[in-house]
Amino acid sequence: MWRSIQLVTLYCTIVVAEEGSFLGASRRLRIHHSALSRRIRHLELMVGVALFERHPGGVKAAAAGEHLLAKIRSILTDLDEALNRVEPRGPGKSVQPSIGLDAPLCSCAFLNAVVGSMASDPEIAPFISFLRRLHPAP
């Protein structure tokens, strides 16, 4: 059975595991911790296993989730390597990456400006770079 799981959810899962807490991960990702917690809980419900053991001091990877977390890391690493090997629009041509959305031009310009300013943050820059490769400019 095919499950629709967003790549950003997989990335968030890895950040939670690295940080050891939803609060720390939410700060690093700059999203509200309750939204992050809901995203991870939804993933856990989809795959049918608890990825994390929750406790007052944070979270720890659950024994049942260890294998899945390792696979998620591998998938994201493989995808990143594959995207790095893709020649953009033919040999010798460069592409100015931007976030592509089905939205009015003014909204896209605004989002690209926000993403551009976020890309200067060393903790967020790798994720922004990853998203830009997934959604190149048309």
Image (tube, helix red, strand yellow):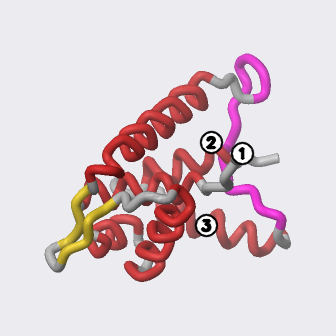
- Between the C-alphas of marks 2 and 3, the distance is 17 Å
The residue carrying pointer 2 sits among few (fewer than 14), some (14 to 19) or many (20 or more) residues within 10 Å by Cα, namely some
Residue 98 magenta: yes
Is tag 1's residue or tag 3's residue first in the polypeptide sequence? 3
**Image depth: mark 2 or mark 3 in front:** 2
Q: Amino acid at mark 3?
A: Ala
Mark on residue 26? Answer: none
Residue at x-position 65% and y-position 45%: 134
Q: Nearer the viewer, residue 35 or 83?
A: 35
- Dot 1: what SS? loop
- Between the C-alphas of marks 1 and 2, the distance is 6 Å
- Dot 2: what SS? helix
Mark on residue 136? Answer: 1
The kind of secondary structure the magenta stretch mainly shows is loop
Q: Amino acid at mark 2?
A: Arg
Q: Is residue 37 above or below residue 74?
A: below
- Residue 62 point in image, percent of width and height: 27, 56
Specify whether residue 120 is in view.
no
Image side of residue 49 versus residue 137, left or right: left
- Residue 63 point in image, percent of width and height: 26, 50
Is tag 2's residue or tag 3's residue first in the polypeptide sequence? 3
**Image depth: mark 1 or mark 3 in front:** 1
Give the residue at mark 3. 113
Q: Nearer the viewer, residue 71 or 81?
A: 71
Q: Amino acid at mark 1?
A: Pro
- Between the C-alphas of marks 1 and 3, the distance is 15 Å
The residue carrying pointer 3 sits among few (fewer than 14), some (14 to 19) or many (20 or more) residues within 10 Å by Cα, namely some
Mark on residue 133? Answer: 2
Magenta range: 89-102
